[in-house]
Amino acid sequence: MKEAPVPQQIPLPAFIKRSHNRFRWSLGITVFVLLGQVVFFVGVAAYNLSLIDWSGDRAVALASPETAILFEQAIVLLPFAGLGFISIIACLLRPRLGWHMAMLAQSGILLIALQVYLSDRNNVLTQRPLLYLYMLGAILIVVFMNSPEGRLLLGQRRRKHNT
């Protein structure tokens, strides 16, 4: 009895060529998703900063509790946006290092978001719907990065041959 051929052994029509690119779409998808997260963080931070009335003395403007809360909500996001941007650059230059940096950035986002979720009952540091979006985005990125497609960025480890 003849076994069915595996998909890699099935001959393709002449107009279709097999791709030998080991990254396939992984690098593009990773950069696009991380860039989306960075743009979202910067957008929320810019929106919060635009709500502050900077027309008077800046020290007086930041002294009011409402303004201080908006300022804190904006400033907390900027380091994660910077770390995400650095992860994008690392993914483009050295995909393996970029994968690890992106995973560390998502872990940091999830850690801080969980701490804020558990400790910020009065919604001082963030608004709950935005916090849920931060957490959802980080979880989805971690799931993608650990999928077989996302792990292609890790590449093949070089094996040492003992001769």
Image: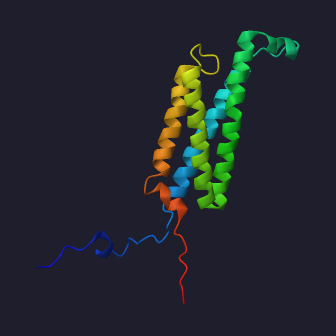
Q: Is 100 in front, or is 50?
A: 100
Q: Is 46 in front, or is 73?
A: 73
As drawn, 9 above or below 35:
below
Is 33 displayed left or right of 75 in the figure?
left
As drawn, 57 above or below 105:
above
As drawn, 13 above or below 123:
below
Which residue is situated farthest in the front direction here? 162
Q: Position of residue 112 (x, y in %)?
A: 61, 32
As drawn, 63 above or below 128:
above
Is 6 displayed left or right of 85 in the figure?
left
Is 112 displayed left or right of 69 in the figure?
left
Q: Is 85 in front, or is 102?
A: 102
Residue 25 in view: no
Residue 24 in view: yes
Which residue is situated farthest in the left direction here? 1
Task: Count how many numbered circles sit on residues in the image.
Answer: 0
Which residue is depicted at the point 54% across and 90% down?
163
Q: Position of residue 29 (x, y in %)?
A: 52, 51
Colour approach in the figure: rainbow
Which residue is depicted at the point 67% across and 32% down?
77
Which residue is depicted at the point 69% across and 29% down?
76
Quadrant hosting residue 92 = bottom right
Q: Position of residue 1 (x, y in %)?
A: 11, 79
Which residue is situated farthest in the right direction here? 57
Q: Position of residue 74 (x, y in %)?
A: 70, 26
Which residue is depicted at the point 63% across and 33% down?
41
